Amino acid sequence: MRLLLLNGPNLNLLGTREPEVYGQTTLSEIEAGLVSLAAELGDEITPYQSNSEGALVDHLQGAADWADGALFNPGGYTHTSVALRDCVAAVSFPVVEVHLSNPAAREDFRHVSLISAVCLGTVAGFGAGSYEGAYRALRSHLIDVAPTSTLKDS
């Protein structure tokens, strides 16, 4: 199966940005680990990061031609972007929302996600491990509900 790994604003600063909240693992390290794990399991993960809301919308829409699903950490747009919420609702594949920290245990404004209601599920609070958990959950879902013949051609 082919999956999009989509990361929003400021996630390019992982490893140096508030390491007490987000950890010391860089986004490049997270991406490399997931790409490697996916390859071991016979899957393909294509990472993309942008600080621009429009670029994230464009990339998610463009993945409809090739992706079977997506892992999405919308960063700060989680709490503000109706455009990204509508885009996730519009794509024909399942999306799992991912967060390094647990937004429900943080500032009040982080308690509401505009994205999660249109996602298959959310994995949050496990640091870099949230990404692997989200990947494994999405992979399991796709195997359970979509026979191989319905997955997009690799």
Image (tube, rainbow, N blue to C red):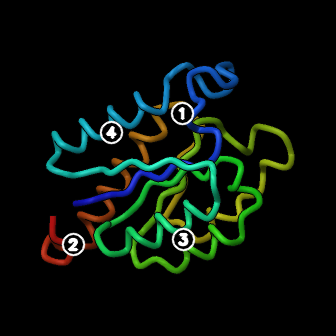
Q: Tell me whether the residue at label 4 lies in contact with that at label 1, contact meaning CB atoms closer than 8 angstroms.
A: no
Q: Is residue 63 left or right of residue 143?
A: right
Circle 1 is placed at which residue position? 126
Q: Earlier in the sequence, mark 4 or mark 2?
A: 4
Q: Return the x and y of residue 124 as percentages of the image width and height.
A: 58, 43
Estimate the spatial distance between the alpha carbons at disc 3 and disc 4, rounded to whole Å. Answer: 21 Å
Quadrant for residue 103, please give it. top right
Q: Earlier in the sequence, mark 1 or mark 3?
A: 3
Q: Is residue 128 left or right of residue 13?
A: left
Q: Residue at x 33, y 33 (%)?
A: 32
Is 52 in front, or is 34? 52
Q: Residue at x 54, y 33 (%)?
A: 126
Circle 4 is placed at which residue position? 34
Amino acid of disc 3 = Val
Amino acid of disc 2 = Lys
Q: Return the x and y of residue 86 as percentages of the image width and height.
A: 62, 76
